[in-house]
């Protein structure tokens, strides 16, 4: 059992015990700031064993954390390690973070797009979590790319390129590094307070001036229900603003994978095609949504970073940086500065060497009416793109390429998706999941789902929370 008293809060001198904190949360009690700091510091230092942290996470998941507890956890996790100060960059520091989705690769587009328009993007990201892919795992499919940089290296890449995408480390948000990996393995991901603390601890530790949050709704989101997603968006905006970071949250559609590719390397390939100025694919496999959402998010970043009067003019600036190749140049510079070999992008198809490939075809003619995107995300993870145990390597080439997307009309026998895995034995379960997850119907889906359904700013977030907790 852990026993320590390592918090600055002097309200009580009594020593804290992790077992008491677990039991208190299990029984629905409200934890004090001191108790929450004890948990975050104990996770970061390793003084609390993983089984106790896992039990606490499950108790917090089931009983929930109040607004005060959520704020305390966010700040304690932010403070669990060193913090980055972007002041020496001489630019406004702005970032984007998503609440987690399938095929969500906008970071590879928005970071260089915003950097090309004059803001600094110090991005601390995560690995695959639950059914969703991880930005770091995707980047590490580039041979040599280092995600665990020291703060000095982080600053030097940012000075050179304007953007840098790195991981939590034992020095940088160590509490999230431990709790994130543990949540992934213990079924404790889908909770608004835990998601808020995880995301914002990283973003606040990066010293951002402004933040754009992409909160997913629909079948592939951690919080599928629109009310829960709205609550998460409002909670994160209010918490980040309270900590001094100007923040907006966009509620965006995750009722299907974003773009065509879901996996590791194949997501980078799709992103680079768009950064090369290629127009989105046409027809049933169109990835217009990926390009559009990336430009909208980058537009907000550029606006909040003071480089455009409105998000719409930010969008136009981002589109110009996409079309003139400046964002692509920045992305390649960043990859090289972090040790990555950009030559793999010269012939991306040649570098793609999955162990096995299988094309899944339509079992009847009809329209793709629905996609259970969480199930599709699990199929991608089980092809080898994600891990069963914390710390396991992932297969850079595993994943799914979709040939037809929601609303598309397909004929029996036409390709729906291509699966990539390491070995043939890994194909059966994902194939079965995929066939169950796609609903083919005689009629086209009647509802057109907007890409962005709602935007929360500080004022609307606070009003929303006041009504929600009343
Ligand atoms: N992204 C994070 O960093 N943490 C979460 O909990 C979910 C998405």
Image (cartoon, rainbow, N blue to C red):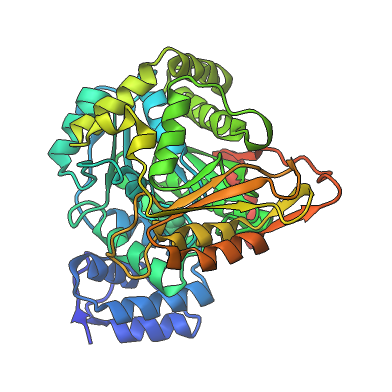
User: x, y (%) of residue 257?
Assistant: 58, 47
Residue 133: percent from the left, percent from the top? 44, 53
Q: Quadrant of ligand 1?
A: bottom left
Name of the residue lying farthest toward the right: 443
Q: Quadrant of residue 330?
A: top left
Q: Position of residue 172 (x, y in %)?
A: 22, 51
**Left or right, 18 with reference to 324:** left
In the rendered view, tell whether residue 437 sits above or below residue 418.
below
The single residue placed furthest to the front in the displayed view is 413
Residue 94 appearing in the image: no
In the image: residue 17, left or right of residue 183: left
Q: Is residue 394 above or below residue 304?
A: below
Residue 218 appears in the figure: yes
Quarter of the image with the N terminus is bottom left
| Residue 161, x across and y down, in percent | 25, 24
In front here: 25 or 214?
A: 214
> Looking at this view, is 138 or 192 the one in front?
138
- In front of the other: 412 or 46: 412
- Quadrant of the image containing the C terminus: bottom right
In the rendered view, tell whether residue 329 sits above or below residue 233.
Answer: above
Q: Residue at x 46, y 83 (%)?
A: 26
Tell me: 354 left or right of 336.
Answer: right
Residue drawn at the location 53% of the way across and 16% of the way down:
316
């Amino acid at each position: 059992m852990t026993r320590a008293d390592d918090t600055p809060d002097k309200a009580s001198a009594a020593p804290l015990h992790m077992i008491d904190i677990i039991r208190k949360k299990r029984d629905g009690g409200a934890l004090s700031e001191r108790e929450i700091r004890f948990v975050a510091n104990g996770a970061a230092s390793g003084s609390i064993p993983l089984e106790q942290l896992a039990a606490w996470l499950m108790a917090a998941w089931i009983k929930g954390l109040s607004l005060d507890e959520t704020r305390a956890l966010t700040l304690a996790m932010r403070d669990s390690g060193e913090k980055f100060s972007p002041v020496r960059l001489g630019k406004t520091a702005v970032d984007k973070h998503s609440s987690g989705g399938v095929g969500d690769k906008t970071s590879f587009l928005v970071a260089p797009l915003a950097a090309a328009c004059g803001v600094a993007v110090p991005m601390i990201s995560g690995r695959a979590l639950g059914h969703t892919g991880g930005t770091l795992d995707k980047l590490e499919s580039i041979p040599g790319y280092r995600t665990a940089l020291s703060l000095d290296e982080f600053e030097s890449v940012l000075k050179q390129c304007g953007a840098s995408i790195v991981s939590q480390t034992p020095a940088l948000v160590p509490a999230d590094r431990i709790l994130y990996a543990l949540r992934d393995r213990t079924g404790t991901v889908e909770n608004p307070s835990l998601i808020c603390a995880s995301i914002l601890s990283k973003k606040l530790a990066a010293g951002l001036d402004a933040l754009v949050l992409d909160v997913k709704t629909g079948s592939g989101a951690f919080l599928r229900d629109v009310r829960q997603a709205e609550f998460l968006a409002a909670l994160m905006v209010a918490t980040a603003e309270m900590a001094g970071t100007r923040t907006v949250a966009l509620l965006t559609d995750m009722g299907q994978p974003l773009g065509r590719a879901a996996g590791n390397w194949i997501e980078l390939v799709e992103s680079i095609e768009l950064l090369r100025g290629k127009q989105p694919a046409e027809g049933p496999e169109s990835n217009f949504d990926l390009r559009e959402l990336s430009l909208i998010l980058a537009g907000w970043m550029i606006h909040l970073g003071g480089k455009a009067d409105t998000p719409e003019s930010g969008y136009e600036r981002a589109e110009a940086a996409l079309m003139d190749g400046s964002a692509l140049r920045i992305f390649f510079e960043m990859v090289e500065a972090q040790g990555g070999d950009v030559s793999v992008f010269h012939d991306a198809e040649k570098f793609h060497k999955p162990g096995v490939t299988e094309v899944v075809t339509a079992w009847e003619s009809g329209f793709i009416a629905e996609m259970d995107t969480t199930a599709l995300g699990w199929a991608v993870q089980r092809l080898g793109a994600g891990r069963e145990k914390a710390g396991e390597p992932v297969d850079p080439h595993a994943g799914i390429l979709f040939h037809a997307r929601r609303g598309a009309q397909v004929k029996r026998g036409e390709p729906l998706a291509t699966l990539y895995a390491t070995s043939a034995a890994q194909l059966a379960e994902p194939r079965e999941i995929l066939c169950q997850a796609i609903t083919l119907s005689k009629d086209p889906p009647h509802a057109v789902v907007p890409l962005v359904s709602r935007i929360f700013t500080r004022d609307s977030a606070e009003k929303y929370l006041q009504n929600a907790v009343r």
